[in-house]
Image (cartoon, rainbow, N blue to C red):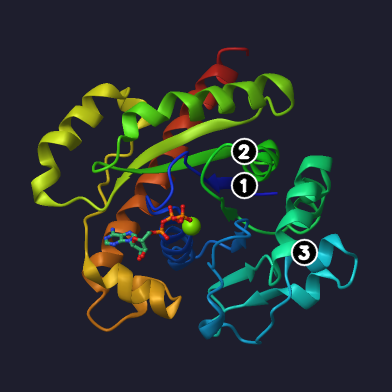
Amino acid sequence: MGKIIAVASHKGGVGKTTTALNLGFSLSRFGQKILLIDGDPQGAMAIASNLKKRTKRGLIDLLRHECTAEDVVILTKDKTMAILGNGVTEPEDVFFFEREARTGNLGKVIRSVVKGYDYVLIDSPAGTGNIVTALLGISNSIIMPINCRTIAVKTLPTFLKLTRRIREKFNTDLHIEGVVITMIDPRDSEMCEELRAALPRSALFETLIPFDAYFEKASSKSVPVAMLSGGAAAGRSYMDLAMELKAREVRDQKIKDEEVEGLF
Ligand SMILES: Nc1ncnc2c1ncn2[C@@H]1O[C@H](COP(=O)(O)OP(=O)(O)OP(=O)(O)O)[C@@H](O)[C@H]1O
Ligand SMILES: [Mg+2]
C-alpha cells in the first residue's frame, strides 16, 4: 500500500483543498497512481466537471452500505487520478458523517478503498474535530498548508498537539510531512520570514505557493490549475512541491537504509 497523506490544518481557507487537488495532479504527472478523497463534508472538492462518470455518491454511501467502491471511486476523464467524493448532500448527512467518524467507521471505510495507489491524498476539514481526528488516525502523514496573512503561527500549536495525541494514542505511524506556505504575495515577505524562522527547517517545505488569481478560477471550475489555459505558471509551483515531496522521501529512505546497513 502507498502513502496516505492528510492535507489538514487548524485554519480554514488556507489552501487545503487546492493543495490536495493540485499536488495530487502533479504527482500523477510523475506517473504515480493517485486517489483523492474528499473528507470535508462541508466543502466541495468534487472535481465533478472533470470526471469520467458523474455521480453524487461517495463516502457516505459506502458508510451506509448502499454501494461498492467501484460505484463511487471515479477516474478523471484523462484517467490521471481517481476521486472519491464524500457524497454529502443534506444537512443531516453531515451529522451522520461526524458520527461515523467518531465511531471509527469512517476510518475503516477509507482503509478499505486505498489499496493499489501510490498516494492517497485526503482533503480534510479545518479544525481539530471528530472528522479530522478520524482522518489523521488512518493517515501516514500530514501536509499542512498555512498562509502568512492569518495568525497561522499562533494556531499551529493546537494542531501539533492534536497530532501528537493521535500518534501517542492510536497511530504511531503519523508524522508531519511538512508545512507548506500558500498564497504568498510579495507584500507578505516580512511575515513569511517570521513564519519560516518560527518553524524548524525540516518541518517546512521550501517550495512556496504564490498567490495567483488562476487558483480561484480553477477552484470555480473544480479542476487543477494547470489544466486552465494560462494556469501553467501557477501549476508549476505544485509540480515543485511534488518534486520536493519525492526528494524528501528519497532522503528519508536513505537514512533508513544506512540504519539497516549498520545492523549487518
Ligand atoms: N495560491 C493561491 N492563490 C490564490 N488563491 C488561492 C490559492 N490557493 C487557494 N486559493 C483560493 O483560496 C480559496 C481557499 O482555498 P481552499 O478552498 O483551497 O482552502 P481550504 O483550506 O480548503 O478552505 P476550507 O478550510 O474552507 O476548506 C479558494 O477560493 C482558492 O481558489
Ligand atoms: Mg477545503
Q: Secondary structure at mark 3?
A: helix
Looking at the image, the residue that sits furthest to the top is 263
Residue occupying the point 58% across, 53% down: 122
Q: Secondary structure at mark 1?
A: strand
Q: Secondary structure at mark 2?
A: loop
Q: Which one is in front in this view, the residue at disc 3 or the one at disc 2?
A: 3
Disc 2 target residue: 140
Q: Earlier in the sequence, mark 3 or mark 2?
A: 3
Would you place residue 73 above or below residue 167 in this image?
Answer: below
Residue toward you, 70 or 55: 55
Cα distance in 3D space between marks 1 and 2? 5 Å
Q: Amino acid at mark 2?
A: Asn
Give x and y (percent) for residue 177: 47, 36
Would you place residue 3 above or below residue 26 in this image?
Answer: above
Label pair 3/1, CB-CB below 8 angstroms:
no
Q: Which quadrant would residue 41 be assigned to in this image?
A: bottom right
Label pair 1/2, CB-CB below 8 angstroms:
yes
* Relative to 167, 185 lies left or right: left
Q: Which numbered marker is on residue 60? A: 3
Q: Which numbered marker is on residue 187? A: none
Q: Amino acid at mark 3?
A: Ile
